[in-house]
Amino acid sequence: MDAQTASPSHSALMDSVYKGQRHIYDVTRKYYLFGRDTLIEGLDAGAGMRVLEVACGTGRNLAKIGKAWPGVQLYGLDISSEMLKNARKALGANARLGLGDACSFDADETFEEAGLSEKGFDRIVLSYSLSMIPDWEGALAHAADRLAPGGELHVVDFGDLTGLPGPLEGMLHKWLARFHVQTRRDLPETARRIADARGMELISKRGKLGYFQLHVLKAPRTAS
Protein backbone atom coordinates (compact mmCIF):
# COMPACT_ATOMS: atom_id res chain seq x y z
CA MET A 1 0.00 0.00 0.00
CA ASP A 2 1.08 3.58 -0.65
CA ALA A 3 0.49 4.68 2.93
CA GLN A 4 3.53 6.97 3.02
CA THR A 5 2.13 9.24 0.31
CA ALA A 6 -1.12 9.88 2.19
CA SER A 7 -1.01 13.24 3.99
CA PRO A 8 -1.10 12.30 7.71
CA SER A 9 -3.22 15.31 8.70
CA HIS A 10 -5.79 14.93 5.93
CA SER A 11 -5.85 11.16 6.34
CA ALA A 12 -6.55 11.53 10.06
CA LEU A 13 -9.26 14.11 9.35
CA MET A 14 -11.01 11.84 6.87
CA ASP A 15 -10.81 8.89 9.25
CA SER A 16 -12.39 10.99 11.99
CA VAL A 17 -15.17 12.13 9.64
CA TYR A 18 -15.97 8.66 8.33
CA LYS A 19 -15.30 6.40 11.31
CA GLY A 20 -18.96 6.56 12.21
CA GLN A 21 -20.45 7.85 8.95
CA ARG A 22 -19.14 4.96 6.86
CA HIS A 23 -21.89 2.76 8.27
CA ILE A 24 -24.65 5.01 6.88
CA TYR A 25 -22.77 6.73 4.06
CA ASP A 26 -24.36 4.99 1.06
CA VAL A 27 -27.88 5.19 2.49
CA THR A 28 -27.70 8.93 3.11
CA ARG A 29 -25.63 10.09 0.13
CA LYS A 30 -27.98 8.70 -2.49
CA TYR A 31 -30.32 11.60 -1.74
CA TYR A 32 -27.91 14.35 -2.71
CA LEU A 33 -24.88 13.01 -4.62
CA PHE A 34 -26.54 13.25 -8.02
CA GLY A 35 -24.85 12.49 -11.32
CA ARG A 36 -22.83 9.49 -10.15
CA ASP A 37 -24.87 6.96 -12.10
CA THR A 38 -24.82 9.22 -15.16
CA LEU A 39 -21.02 9.14 -14.96
CA ILE A 40 -21.00 5.34 -14.71
CA GLU A 41 -23.33 4.99 -17.70
CA GLY A 42 -20.98 7.11 -19.79
CA LEU A 43 -17.77 5.21 -19.04
CA ASP A 44 -18.06 3.00 -22.15
CA ALA A 45 -15.55 0.59 -20.60
CA GLY A 46 -14.81 -2.66 -22.41
CA ALA A 47 -13.78 -6.00 -20.94
CA GLY A 48 -10.16 -6.02 -19.83
CA MET A 49 -9.94 -2.27 -19.34
CA ARG A 50 -8.29 -1.03 -16.15
CA VAL A 51 -10.74 1.23 -14.27
CA LEU A 52 -9.51 3.21 -11.27
CA GLU A 53 -11.59 5.23 -8.83
CA VAL A 54 -9.55 7.77 -6.91
CA ALA A 55 -11.09 8.33 -3.46
CA CYS A 56 -13.30 5.27 -3.85
CA GLY A 57 -14.88 5.55 -0.41
CA THR A 58 -17.18 2.63 0.40
CA GLY A 59 -16.71 1.05 -3.03
CA ARG A 60 -20.28 1.85 -4.06
CA ASN A 61 -19.28 3.22 -7.46
CA LEU A 62 -16.78 0.45 -8.21
CA ALA A 63 -19.42 -2.19 -7.49
CA LYS A 64 -21.83 -0.50 -9.89
CA ILE A 65 -19.10 -0.09 -12.52
CA GLY A 66 -18.35 -3.80 -12.31
CA LYS A 67 -22.00 -4.63 -12.93
CA ALA A 68 -22.50 -2.06 -15.70
CA TRP A 69 -19.29 -2.96 -17.53
CA PRO A 70 -18.57 -6.70 -17.06
CA GLY A 71 -14.99 -7.85 -17.42
CA VAL A 72 -13.27 -4.61 -16.43
CA GLN A 73 -10.37 -4.69 -13.97
CA LEU A 74 -11.33 -2.62 -10.94
CA TYR A 75 -8.92 -0.56 -8.83
CA GLY A 76 -9.68 1.81 -5.97
CA LEU A 77 -7.71 3.96 -3.58
CA ASP A 78 -8.70 6.17 -0.68
CA ILE A 79 -6.89 8.27 1.90
CA SER A 80 -9.23 6.98 4.64
CA SER A 81 -8.48 3.55 6.05
CA GLU A 82 -11.95 3.65 7.64
CA MET A 83 -13.70 3.94 4.27
CA LEU A 84 -11.53 1.20 2.83
CA LYS A 85 -12.94 -1.18 5.46
CA ASN A 86 -16.34 -0.81 3.80
CA ALA A 87 -14.88 -1.05 0.30
CA ARG A 88 -13.05 -4.29 1.06
CA LYS A 89 -16.18 -5.77 2.56
CA ALA A 90 -18.32 -4.71 -0.41
CA LEU A 91 -15.92 -5.69 -3.18
CA GLY A 92 -13.91 -8.59 -1.80
CA ALA A 93 -11.66 -10.03 -4.49
CA ASN A 94 -13.46 -8.13 -7.27
CA ALA A 95 -11.15 -5.11 -6.98
CA ARG A 96 -7.61 -4.19 -6.00
CA LEU A 97 -7.76 -1.59 -3.22
CA GLY A 98 -5.06 0.51 -1.59
CA LEU A 99 -4.46 3.37 0.82
CA GLY A 100 -3.10 6.45 -0.91
CA ASP A 101 -3.22 10.19 -1.49
CA ALA A 102 -5.04 11.36 -4.63
CA CYS A 103 -2.34 13.96 -5.24
CA SER A 104 0.70 11.69 -5.18
CA PHE A 105 -0.11 7.98 -5.30
CA ASP A 106 2.16 5.59 -7.18
CA ALA A 107 0.06 2.87 -8.82
CA ASP A 108 2.74 0.16 -8.62
CA GLU A 109 3.17 0.62 -4.88
CA THR A 110 -0.45 1.30 -4.02
CA PHE A 111 -1.75 -1.83 -5.72
CA GLU A 112 1.43 -3.91 -5.45
CA GLU A 113 1.42 -4.53 -9.20
CA ALA A 114 4.65 -3.95 -11.09
CA GLY A 115 4.33 -2.08 -14.38
CA LEU A 116 0.91 -0.61 -13.62
CA SER A 117 2.19 2.96 -13.57
CA GLU A 118 3.74 2.52 -17.01
CA LYS A 119 0.60 0.96 -18.51
CA GLY A 120 -1.74 3.52 -16.99
CA PHE A 121 -5.50 3.27 -16.60
CA ASP A 122 -8.11 3.19 -19.35
CA ARG A 123 -10.69 4.93 -17.17
CA ILE A 124 -10.23 6.99 -14.02
CA VAL A 125 -13.13 8.23 -11.89
CA LEU A 126 -13.26 11.13 -9.45
CA SER A 127 -16.72 11.19 -7.89
CA TYR A 128 -17.59 13.91 -5.37
CA SER A 129 -14.02 13.83 -4.12
CA LEU A 130 -12.40 17.00 -5.46
CA SER A 131 -14.71 19.03 -3.23
CA MET A 132 -13.04 17.38 -0.21
CA ILE A 133 -9.40 17.37 -1.35
CA PRO A 134 -7.40 20.46 -0.27
CA ASP A 135 -5.09 20.36 -3.31
CA TRP A 136 -7.88 19.38 -5.67
CA GLU A 137 -6.18 20.88 -8.72
CA GLY A 138 -3.13 18.74 -8.02
CA ALA A 139 -5.32 15.66 -7.64
CA LEU A 140 -7.03 16.32 -10.98
CA ALA A 141 -3.71 16.81 -12.76
CA HIS A 142 -2.20 13.71 -11.13
CA ALA A 143 -5.16 11.62 -12.27
CA ALA A 144 -4.92 12.97 -15.82
CA ASP A 145 -1.27 11.92 -15.92
CA ARG A 146 -2.13 8.36 -14.87
CA LEU A 147 -4.21 7.68 -18.01
CA ALA A 148 -3.20 5.17 -20.63
CA PRO A 149 -3.10 6.39 -24.27
CA GLY A 150 -6.71 6.92 -25.31
CA GLY A 151 -7.86 6.73 -21.70
CA GLU A 152 -10.53 8.92 -20.12
CA LEU A 153 -10.83 10.76 -16.82
CA HIS A 154 -14.46 11.10 -15.67
CA VAL A 155 -15.27 13.67 -12.98
CA VAL A 156 -18.53 14.45 -11.19
CA ASP A 157 -18.91 16.86 -8.29
CA PHE A 158 -21.04 19.63 -6.90
CA GLY A 159 -21.64 22.46 -9.33
CA ASP A 160 -21.96 26.17 -8.66
CA LEU A 161 -25.49 25.67 -7.20
CA THR A 162 -26.51 29.03 -8.67
CA GLY A 163 -29.77 27.65 -10.05
CA LEU A 164 -31.06 27.04 -6.53
CA PRO A 165 -33.08 29.71 -4.70
CA GLY A 166 -30.72 32.03 -2.80
CA PRO A 167 -31.61 30.92 0.74
CA LEU A 168 -31.42 27.24 -0.22
CA GLU A 169 -28.05 27.73 -1.91
CA GLY A 170 -26.67 29.36 1.21
CA MET A 171 -28.03 26.67 3.50
CA LEU A 172 -26.57 23.91 1.34
CA HIS A 173 -23.13 25.53 1.33
CA LYS A 174 -23.19 25.78 5.14
CA TRP A 175 -24.41 22.20 5.52
CA LEU A 176 -21.72 20.85 3.18
CA ALA A 177 -19.04 22.77 5.06
CA ARG A 178 -19.87 20.73 8.16
CA PHE A 179 -18.49 17.70 6.27
CA HIS A 180 -15.43 19.59 4.99
CA VAL A 181 -16.95 19.90 1.51
CA GLN A 182 -16.31 22.98 -0.61
CA THR A 183 -17.81 23.43 -4.06
CA ARG A 184 -15.26 24.02 -6.83
CA ARG A 185 -16.72 26.81 -8.96
CA ASP A 186 -13.53 27.06 -11.03
CA LEU A 187 -13.41 23.34 -11.82
CA PRO A 188 -14.52 23.89 -15.44
CA GLU A 189 -11.68 26.34 -16.07
CA THR A 190 -9.16 24.14 -14.30
CA ALA A 191 -10.26 21.06 -16.25
CA ARG A 192 -9.86 23.05 -19.47
CA ARG A 193 -6.37 24.19 -18.52
CA ILE A 194 -5.26 20.66 -17.58
CA ALA A 195 -6.77 19.19 -20.75
CA ASP A 196 -5.22 21.80 -23.05
CA ALA A 197 -1.77 21.35 -21.50
CA ARG A 198 -1.89 17.62 -22.30
CA GLY A 199 -3.54 17.76 -25.69
CA MET A 200 -6.73 16.20 -24.30
CA GLU A 201 -10.30 16.61 -25.47
CA LEU A 202 -12.65 17.97 -22.81
CA ILE A 203 -16.40 17.39 -22.66
CA SER A 204 -18.33 19.16 -19.89
CA LYS A 205 -21.94 19.14 -18.72
CA ARG A 206 -23.75 21.30 -16.19
CA GLY A 207 -26.44 19.49 -14.24
CA LYS A 208 -29.91 20.88 -13.65
CA LEU A 209 -29.89 24.09 -11.58
CA GLY A 210 -26.11 23.85 -11.47
CA TYR A 211 -26.36 21.20 -8.76
CA PHE A 212 -23.63 19.02 -10.25
CA GLN A 213 -21.01 19.19 -12.97
CA LEU A 214 -19.60 16.43 -15.17
CA HIS A 215 -16.29 16.55 -17.03
CA VAL A 216 -14.60 13.98 -19.26
CA LEU A 217 -10.95 14.47 -20.19
CA LYS A 218 -9.92 12.21 -23.09
CA ALA A 219 -6.23 11.47 -23.57
CA PRO A 220 -4.84 11.22 -27.13
CA ARG A 221 -4.21 7.69 -28.36
CA THR A 222 -0.64 8.49 -29.27
CA ALA A 223 1.89 10.90 -27.81
CA SER A 224 1.91 14.25 -29.58
Image (cartoon, helix red, strand yellow):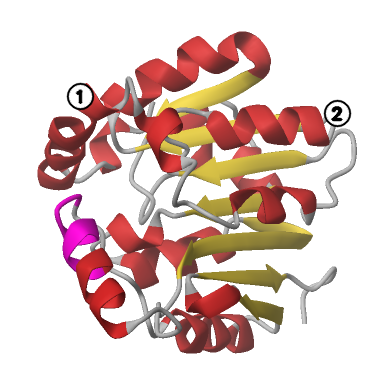
Amino acid type shown at disc 1: Lys
In this picture, is 39 found above or below 163? above
Examine the rendered structure and indicate whether residue 107 appears above or below residue 154: above
Q: Amino acid at mark 2?
A: Pro
Instruction: Read off the magenta span.
Output: 173-179
Residue 94 in the image: state x and y as whole percent.
66, 16
- The answer to which of 40 and 94 lies nearer the viewer is 40
Mark 2 sits on what residue? Answer: 70
Considering only order in the chain, which callout, 1 or 2, is on the residue closer to the N terminus?
1
Residue 71 image offset from top left, x and y in percent: 85, 27
Q: Quadrant of residue 51?
A: top right
Q: Does residue 84 appear to the left or right of 93 in the view shown?
A: left
Q: Is residue 165 found left or right of 53 in the rendered image?
A: left
Disc 2 to disc 1, C-alpha distance: 31 Å
Q: Quadrant of the C terminus?
A: bottom right
Dominant SS in magenta: helix
Reply above or below: 92 against 64.
above
Residue 147 visible in the current orientation: yes
Displayed quadrant of residue 213: bottom right
Q: Residue at x 69, y 80 (%)?
A: 202
Element type where label 2 sits in the image? loop
Can you tell which of label 2 and label 1 is closer to the viewer? 1
**Quadrant, the N terminus:** top left
Position in image of residue 107 (x %, y %): 52, 40
Please tell me whether residue 93 is drawn above or below residue 166 in the rendered image: above
Task: Check disc 1 and report the residue beneath it.
Answer: 19
**How many numbered marks, from 0 up?**
2
